[in-house]
Image: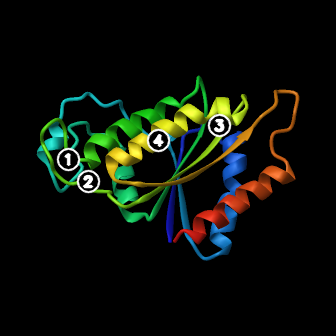
């Protein structure tokens, strides 16, 4: 299986990446392909709601010429999409939100009464999030938004790993969190 991790963290050595590393190691140990795209390193502009993409029912078709086409192509090549992001103000980071807006229109060729195809229908989506609040109050709104996003896009939502950071004076990554990340990878592999 091919896993694509869309990394929404601005920090290369931050909490979210520390959680993603053992997750990726577990996937690779079990002969899965795994690629990570750092969204903060990419030029992905926000959607303009111009609807040009809706004129192209077999391709991305976006009027904005930036690196969103790369994300589109990588998603189509993958079986499972992992949205990895710290939670800031109860939702994902800005580059992830921009990418999600662009994909929902570029991948789904239906707007209003127009009913075209979903170019990524059937793909699996999972979340890896980190937050400062208790998970049920920190990542719950993002998870609910992604569930609706998946339903709209005909994607299969398959779960979330969320870990909490208790504060700047505490170590984030622990053996328990590393084991949870590995276990989450094994759970997703069982869904293949």
Could you tell me which residue is drawn at 32 percent across and 42 percent down? 104
Could you tell me which residue is drawn at 66 percent across and 67 percent down? 186
Label 4–label 1 contact, CB within 8 A: no
The reply, left or right, for residue 16 in relation to residue 59 is right
Quadrant in the rendering for residue 189: bottom right
The reply, left or right, for residue 39 in relation to residue 101 is right
Quadrant in the rendering for residue 30: bottom right
Question: Where does residue 78 sit, x and y in percent of width and height?
Answer: 43, 63
Residue on which the image places disc 2: 118
Question: Where does residue 161 sit, x and y in percent of width and height?
Answer: 65, 49
Looking at the image, is mark 4 or mark 1 earlier in the sequence?
A: 1
Could you tell me which residue is drawn at 48 percent across and 29 percent down? 94
- Distance from the alpha carbon under mark 3 to that under mark 2: 33 Å
Q: Secondary structure at mark 2?
A: loop
Q: How is the image coloured?
A: rainbow
Label 2–label 1 contact, CB within 8 A: yes
**Neighbour tally class for label 1: few under 14, some 14-19, many 20 plus, Cα within 10 Å:** many
């Amino acid at each position: 299986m091919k896993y694509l991790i869309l990394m929404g963290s601005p920090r290369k050595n931050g909490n979210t990446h520390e959680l993603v590393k053992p997750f990726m190691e577990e996937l690779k140990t079990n002969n899965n392909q795994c690629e990570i795209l750092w969204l903060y390193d990419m030029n992905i502009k926000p959607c303009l709601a111009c609807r040009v993409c809706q004129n192209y029912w077999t391709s991305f078709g976006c009027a904005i010429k930036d690196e969103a086409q790369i994300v589109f192509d990588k998603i189509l090549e993958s079986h499972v999409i992992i949205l990895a992001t710290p939670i800031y103000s109860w939702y994902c980071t800005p580059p992830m939100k921009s990418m999600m807006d662009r994909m929902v229109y570029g991948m789904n060729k239906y707007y209003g009464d127009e009913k075209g195809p979903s170019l990524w229908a059937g793909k699996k989506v999972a979340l890896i999030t980190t937050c400062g609040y208790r998970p049920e109050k920190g990542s719950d709104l993002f998870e609910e938004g992604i569930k609706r996003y998946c339903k709209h896009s005909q994607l299969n939502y398959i779960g979330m790993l969320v870990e909490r950071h208790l504060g700047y004076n505490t170590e984030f990554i622990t053996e328990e969190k590393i084991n949870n990340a590995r276990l989450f990878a094994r759970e997703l592999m069982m869904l293949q």
